[in-house]
Amino acid sequence: MQNSFQYLNDYYDKIFVLSLPRLTDRIETLKSNLNGLHYELFEGIDKENVTMRELKSKGLYDTKRYQQFYKKPLEIPVGMLCCALGHVKMY
């Protein structure tokens, strides 16, 4: 499998993979399927471990700012917000 990823390894400086620590089966599948690819695994923010109140108190989300850009839903779902924050964490 090493040779099938050689082009990607040569082309990209870094490859990032985002997942959640509790998804152990998914992580093991990733490791198996991506064997030979030079990547870095990032731990995302799990919606099971945070509340919207907590994210707001840390300044990571503001309902009024969200509503300036999106009309519906009135509040972003916590899972969607955690996904976005996971990507921001990688950046």
Image (tube, rainbow, N blue to C red):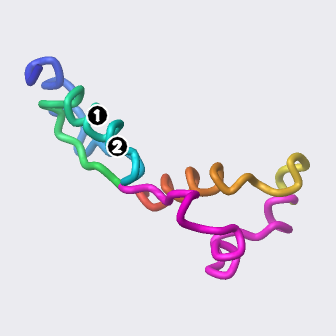
- Give the residues drawn in magenta, as a range: 43-67
Residue drawn at x 71%, y 74% is 53
The relative height of residue 38 versus residue 86 in the rendered view (above or below) is above
Whole-percent x and y of residue 70?
84, 50
Number of residues whose C-alpha sits closer than 10 Å to that of mark 2, classed few (under 14), some (14–19) or many (20 or more): some
Q: Is residue 37 above or below residue 88?
A: above
The residue sitting at 43% across, 57% down in the picture is 91
Q: Could you say which is closer to the camera, residue 27 or residue 13?
A: 27
Q: Which amino acid type is shown beneath numbered disc 2? A: Val
Q: Is residue 76 above or below residue 53?
A: above
Which residue is rendered at x = 28% and y = 31% of the image? Answer: 29
Left or right, residue 73 beside residue 85: right
Image height check: is 75 above or below 13?
Answer: below
Q: Position of residue 26 (x, y in %)?
A: 35, 37
Question: Does the magenta-highlighted stretch encompass residue 49?
Answer: yes
Q: Which residue is mark 2?
A: 17
Q: Are marks 2 and 1 in contact (CB under 8 Å)?
A: yes
Point out the tag, 2 or 1, that comes first from the N-terminus. Answer: 2
Q: Residues within 10 Å of mark 1 (few under 14, many from 20)?
A: some
Identity, as a three-letter code, of the amino acid under mark 1: Leu
- Residue at numbered disc 1: 30
In magenta segment, residue 61: yes
Q: CA distance from mark 2 to mark 1?
A: 9 Å
